[in-house]
Image (cartoon, rainbow, N blue to C red):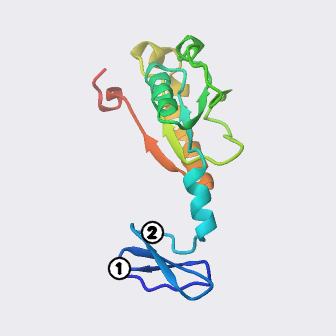
Amino acid sequence: FLNIIVNPFRIKVQNKRVLYKKRGGRETARRGYRHDAVRTRQEDELTKERQKVAAVTGAAGFIGSHLCDYLLGKGQRVIGLDNLNTGTLRNLEHIDSEDFVYMNLDITGYIDIPGEVDYIYHLACPASPIDYLQISLHTLKVGAVGTLNSLGLAKFKCARFLFTSTSEVYGQP
């Protein structure tokens, strides 16, 4: 497949095996397939040991708060984003972890999260017909502009992105 040789301490990808070239000219093999063939061994080891960071939009909602619990249980650091339009802090009260940070933020505006982010879970959207009647324009903005801003953040942070929706978008309230 790929035959890429880069400077010493760089990777050589060949037939779905990763080969690290040492200074002495010897190569050591690692299993697995790498898409990015320019990472050094030191960078790879730092990535393994660094705690993964997930950002959850709509974190104060029912599903968002449970997702935060799940991710914290998996050992990830979680940044919960919500403007509390339809969510409530009661859903997040029970989380007592140093790895959880809550930011009161409206995703229809600029999203700035300091540090690295590995995953973005976009769950923010008012999901009740009652909410649609009261804040209908904001619901549309969250669905369109909020998703665009979340995708922009994912692109800027080189993070994986997961978008969720409700059955109401299909006309089934």
Q: Residue beneath label 2, please?
A: 34
Camera-side residue of 110 and 16: 16
The kind of residue tagged 2 is: Arg
Helix, strand or loop at disc 1? loop
Asked whether residue 157 appears in the rendered view, the answer is yes
- For marks 1 and 2, the one nearer the N-term is 1
Q: Residue beneath label 1, please?
A: 15
Q: Residue 145 in the image: x percent, y percent?
A: 56, 40
Tell me what residue is drawn at x 56 percent, y 45 percent: 52
Q: Residue 48 in the image: x percent, y percent?
A: 55, 54
Helix, strand or loop at disc 2? loop
Residue 137's place in the image compared with 146, above or below, is: above
Q: In which quarter of the image is residue 77?
A: top right
Q: Quadrant of residue 66?
A: top left
Other-residue count near label 2 (Cα within 10 Å), few / some / many at <14 / 14–19 / ≥20 = some
**Image quarter in which the C terminus is found:** top left
**Image quarter in which the N terminus is found:** bottom left
